[in-house]
Amino acid sequence: MPPEHKPLFVSSVAKRFLYCSGLLSLYHRVRNQRSLTVVMFHQVLPEDDPRWPDTDPNWTVTSHLFRNCLEFFRRHYNVIGIDDLLRAGDGGENLPARPLLITFDDGWADNEQYAAGILQEYGLPAVVFVVAGAVDQEGFWRERLYRQWRRGSLDADQLGGLWRALPDAEDTKPRDWTSAKAFWALANRLDTLDDVSRTALLNTIFQPSSALEGSVMLSTAQLGALAKARISIGSHGLTHTPIPLAANPQKELKDSRRRLVALLGLEERRAPLALSFPHGLYNEETVQLARAAGYRLLFTSDPHLTSADTANWQTALIGRLNISSGNITDRNGSFRPELLALWLFNRPRVFTGTRRKENARISSVASVRY
Ligand SMILES: [Zn+2]
């Protein structure tokens, strides 16, 4: 392989030097002056919370790491709220330099219990995209199954039985059900079932929900508390089904908005105007349906920045960057700001709305689950 085609290897020492010397920050200040960065969180919990052992580490950050991230955002960005984006208008003329929006997906109870208070301490706004049908509920089937699996309360017979009960179960050899790979292979296959078949199958092994499980998702009261704490509420669908795969996409889009209006006690004209696509999946039709349902800001899970110069926000598909603790900490779990800087500062920038034809498609970002 010619030298110029060798993959770029930057050692951890070099990464730290790039950050500590201020070079990365300088690069970011010049390059991203007119780029909107949107970050995506899911759960925020302290490690001593009883729910911590049951959370998925890929989609959960500790309260401490969340604070580290907020300090980082304050240092390198101007954090804006959803209202700033709604007011930005064509060309984003009212946006500050290096704008950043903090988002959360799903509507986890911990967002109100921990993240909201920390955001208030730092004086920063955010938006929580809520699965309207999950409010006051015990959570999504994937998370319930995951919790039972992590606790070791599902034995190999039960998991093997589920696997064999799936249609076209060609591979029926015994599996090591203690491995995460085997578990997620099962979960991904369950994902392909329709809701009724999957619920019937899972109800044979789901344990009765405990008080702990009951507090996993936001309650109506917590939703109201978030709204009062300068946290905007957006929609993440009605049932968390990917919109392009839903039997009735319009119902997912319209009824989630209606339900949020009812839960928050809002006037119809104050209905949430922002939507993040469940599982990050969308296509041209769902984009059109979402706009027809009244959404003015559409957020994907495609990992890119959005150019503030050219975007007409109300026709743009706004990308988001997931914050995963594994990507921004060292082996000891300590925050490494240079890793977060390298993840955020150098993402591709997408021009949407006015200059480039919209990139409406089924997202192929395989890592996006929520
Ligand atoms: Zn989600």
Image: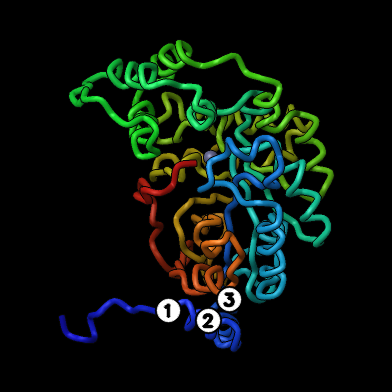
Image quadrant occupied by the N terminus: bottom left
Residue 94: percent from the left, percent from the top? Answer: 70, 70
- For image coordinates 59% across by 44% down, the residue present is 105
Would you call the spot at circle 3 few (<14 residues within 10 Å), some (14-19), or many (20 or more)? many
> Observer-nearest residue: 331 or 218?
331
Is 233 left, or right, of 25 in this rendering? right
- For image coordinates 83% across by 58% down, the residue present is 121
Q: Quadrant of residue 216?
A: top right
- Judging by the rendered image, the residue that carries numbered circle 1 is 11
Label 2 lies in ligand 1 vicinity (Cβ under 8 Å): no
Nearer the N terminus, badge 3 or badge 1? 1
**How far apart are the alpha carbons under marks 3 and 1?**
29 Å
- Judging by the rendered image, the residue that carries numbered circle 3 is 34
Assign a secondary structure to mark 1.
loop
Let me know if residue 309 appears in the view: no
Assign a secondary structure to mark 3.
loop
Disc 3 residue type (three-letter)? Arg
Would you call the spot at circle 1 few (<14 residues within 10 Å), some (14-19), or many (20 or more)? few
Assign a secondary structure to mark 2.
helix
Let me know if residue 332 appears in the view: yes
Residue 334: percent from the left, percent from the top? Answer: 61, 64
As drawn, 328 above or below 281 = below
- Judging by the rendered image, the residue that carries numbered circle 2 is 31
